[in-house]
Amino acid sequence: MSRDRTAFVCQQCGYQTARWMGKCPDCGTWGSLLEQRAAARGGGAAPAQVGTAPLPITAIPADGALCTPLGLAELDRALGGGLVPGSVLLLGGEPGIGKSTLLLQAAAAAARSGRQVLYVSGEESAGQIRRRAERLTALAEGLRLLPETRLEAILGQAEATRPHLLILDSVQAVTADGLQSGPGTISQVREAATALQRAAKQTGMSVLLIGHVTKDGTLAGPKSLEHLVDTVCSFEGEQTQPYRVLRVLKHRFGSTEEVGLFEMTEAGLVEVGNPSARLLRERPEHAPGSAVLAALEGNRPMLLEVQALVAPAGLGAARRVAGGVDRERLALLLAVLERHVGLVLGPSDVYVNVAGGLRVTEPAADLAIVAAVLSSARNRPVDPRLVCCGEVGLAGEVRSVRQVPRRLGEAARLGFTRALLPAADAGAVAPSGLALEGLRRVAALPETLFPGK
Ligand code: TYD
Ligand code: MG
């Protein structure tokens, strides 16, 4: 075989060039170009492979039918049923959020259902993993551990043991022979992902890659893999809070609208089958500053408690603290409240938080945020049987949101009796027991929430 061709790849932006340069011509970073093995091109030195033969389209079963459940219900649910053989999934998340825990539990579940699982750890020793597995009651015969960081050795073991499922913890810990760059660089993680992708396609094993990602994006590696893999999931939550959300960001075999919810406990991750009930469990029902949002996580309706505290500011600039909601969005909503409701917040600190440590990014959360702030500022509780959803526009208008019937169904199921929603959505069929109240303008919110004052 002839020598592999190499290219130089910027570790910041992914720019490629045939020769080394001190500065990336694309993003201008100094010293960021590192050598990477170029992919073999058609007609090149790589030997021809037989691969899988093409099939008539009519002979191919539809995707859904192909996936095999892992045996962890919330994970399978998020993936639309389970894993597709031969596919590669990337699980991203912050260090310490629970990625190893989740996949070790998934590995054990798969092994118990009769599959051979190879868990490759480049970060922890086999003894450490065994100890964790004991805690998680994840000891299973078909689960093999391999502490290894060399890509070639991992591929060799995969070839020798032919697992149904290979888990690599983490893609950033692996190094390929012949690459100068260190572990975790874009060159290395791409090399590993590409090689495993190829092995997966050839043997039909499913590959799960763990990739650490930080909020500020300082660990850029996994981001550069997203186009190489079939499925990208992210595992999110607040380190100090027990809840974790598994989101599917890309999925070649199904919807990205499914999410899984877990709770981190002493004995590992426990699936939360009824999120709304769990998340509202500790809600103070008659306290000012609390409003319930009929949210959607993907396609899944979830009732969340939004809390606000408006307090006199000390010396210096008033604080605006947002937990689980976007800070800029909060600033905008406070400005709308000042302008259209006449609520003067200038000299006050405002804290807003989504209970349970979950994040909401959909604009439908606006109305609940505004209601919680107003409730705290007026020191009057919101009706505990009321849920809200609605986007708030800059002109103080309340704008329609998606999938209203799902939200209402969940509210009714949890025993709520009033739903405050955009006027444009108030024509929806109300589930029994739930009265719909349409709101056209934020200006009408105080009278709706606290009539007679
Ligand atoms: P881990 O899966 O190691 O995170 P990651 O692989 O994403 O870096 O989990 C880390 C945290 O989870 C750790 O701080 C301890 C906590 N944890 C539990 O609370 N219970 C458990 O059973 C386990 C295994 C971990
Ligand atoms: Mg880990």
Image (tube, rainbow, N blue to C red):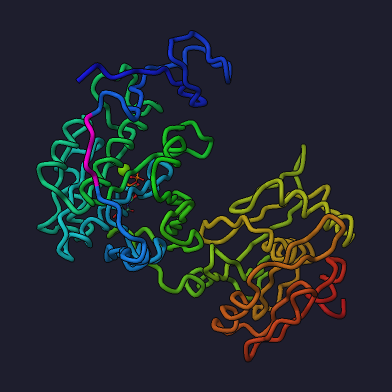
Residue 128 position (above or below residue 394): above
User: Which residue is at a point 43% across and 49% down the rendered structure image?
Assistant: 232
Residue 1 position (above or below residue 48): above
The percent position of residue 340, horizontal first and vertical second, equals 89, 60
The percent position of residue 335, horizontal first and vertical second, equals 82, 51
The percent position of residue 395, horizontal first and vertical second, equals 87, 57
Q: Which secondary structure type mostly characterizes the magenta part of the structure?
A: loop
The total number of labels drawn is 0
**Quick one: 308 or 192, which is closer to the camera?**
192
Residue 381 left/right relative to 73: right
Q: Quadrant of residue 266?
A: bottom left
Residue 380 position (above or below residue 37): below
The percent position of residue 354, horizontal first and vertical second, equals 59, 59
Q: Is residue 314 magenta?
A: no
**Quick one: 8 or 79, which is closer to the camera?**
8
Q: Which residues are magenta?
A: 47-51
User: Which residue is at a point 53% across and 35% down the rendered structure image?
Assistant: 216
